[in-house]
Image: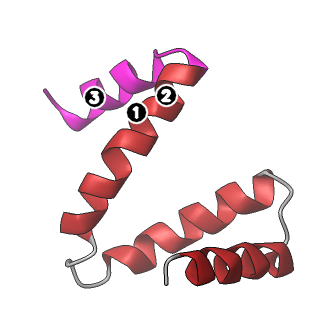
Amino acid sequence: MTVEELKEAVLALETEEKKAFVLAALPELGKDLAKEPGFLGQLLPIFLGLVKEAGIDMQQLLQMASLMAGQQK
């Protein structure tokens, strides 16, 4: 399956299925991809764009990150 075919298949899912896919796949993908030099730098603008589209400002994002970091201890 090509990247384009995979993308089309995922985009054809219903919203709840897309959410389930992202939540299931991203942690596993992230483990491998975080080891790649420069990849997180490519991913960060996409993530920040999603945050902006959701209406969350950077201060809110930092507060959320701080709370999550405290919970992981």
Q: Which residue is drawn at 59% across and 22% down?
A: 15
Secondary-structure class at tag 2: helix
| Mark with earlier residue (1, 3) | 3
Secondary-structure class at tag 1: helix
Q: Residue at x 49, y 84 (%)?
A: 73
State if disc 3 and disc 2 touch (CB < 8 Å). no
Q: Which residue is drawn at 20% across and 78% down?
A: 35
Q: Residue at x 67, y 55 (%)?
A: 50
Residue 69 location (% of width, % of height): 57, 82
Dot 1 alpha-carbon crowd within 10 angstroms: few under 14, some 14 to 19, many 20 or more: few
Q: What stretch is highlighted in magenta?
A: 1-15
Q: What residue type is labelled 3?
A: Leu
State if disc 2 and disc 1 touch (CB < 8 Å). yes
Dot 3 alpha-carbon crowd within 10 angstroms: few under 14, some 14 to 19, many 20 or more: few
Secondary-structure class at tag 3: helix
Residue 61 location (% of width, % of height): 74, 73
Q: Quadrant of residue 52?
A: bottom right
Q: How far apart are marks 1 and 2 (CA)?
A: 5 Å
Residue 34 location (% of width, % of height): 28, 74
Of circles 2 and 3, the one toward us is 2
Q: How far apart are marks 2 and 3 (CA)?
A: 12 Å
Q: What residue type is labelled 2?
A: Lys
Q: In which quarter of the image is the N terminus?
A: top left
Q: How far apart are marks 1 and 3 (CA)?
A: 12 Å
| Mark with earlier residue (2, 3) | 3
The residue labelled by disc 1 is 21
The residue labelled by disc 2 is 18
Q: Nearest the camera: 68 or 26?
A: 68
The residue labelled by disc 3 is 6
Q: Is residue 6 magenta?
A: yes
